Amino acid sequence: MQIQNHLIVSTIGGIGVYLICDSFKAGIVSFLAGVLIDLDHIPDYLFFKKGNLNLKDFFSDYLNIKLSRYYLIFHSYELIFILFSLYIFVGKDPILIGLIVGITIHILLDHLTNTKNPFSYFFIYRALKKFKREELL
């Protein structure tokens, strides 16, 4: 269900970015950023499983919250802050807007549906808690 929600919200976000920025590339980047951000789950899983990748177990372990630590390097409000700062200080590129919108929508949806801890989507907080599942979820 979570994957479907991300696909739907990322599609809407991508269309919105396309319409606002009048840039097909920015719309595609927004959609892809909203979906592909989840690739950061793979290193967490591989670390937990000591390098053994099994897609069936991968989804089961995540859905059933079996991993002992959650690093999730892209799932952080700090990343949004960095990207937004780049947008303001380096250049107002529509592609960067797409990246910011896609990642922000994904993280907000995750934050609203996945956690009871309001700080768990801050990378610095996760680091201070040593990325331990029981401290974050």
Image: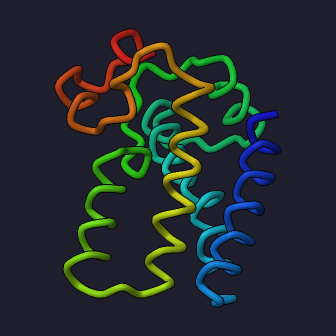
Work out whether residue 27 or residue 42 is closer to the camera in this orientation and state it: 27
Q: Residue 49: image x %, image y %?
A: 52, 32
Work out whether residue 39 or residue 2 is closer to the camera in this orientation and state it: 2
Work out whether residue 86 or residue 137 is closer to the camera in this orientation and state it: 86
Q: Residue 30: image x %, image y %?
A: 60, 70
Q: Is residue 33 above or below residue 22?
A: above
In this rendering, position of residue 126 left or right of residue 24? left
Q: Residue 34: image x %, image y %?
A: 61, 58
The residue depicted at 52 percent of the width and 31 percent of the height is 111
Number of numbered markers: 0
The residue depicted at 77 percent of the width and 53 percent of the height is 7
Q: Residue 74: image x %, image y %?
A: 41, 52
Among all residues in the image, which is located at the extreme front? 20
The residue depicted at 17 percent of the width and 25 percent of the height is 128
Q: Is residue 31 above or below residue 80?
A: below
In this rendering, position of residue 51 left or right of residue 2? left
Q: Is residue 41 above or below residue 82?
A: above
How has the structure been colored for display? rainbow
The residue depicted at 63 percent of the width and 28 percent of the height is 62
- Image quadrant occupied by the N terminus: top right
In this rendering, position of residue 83 left or right of residue 48? left
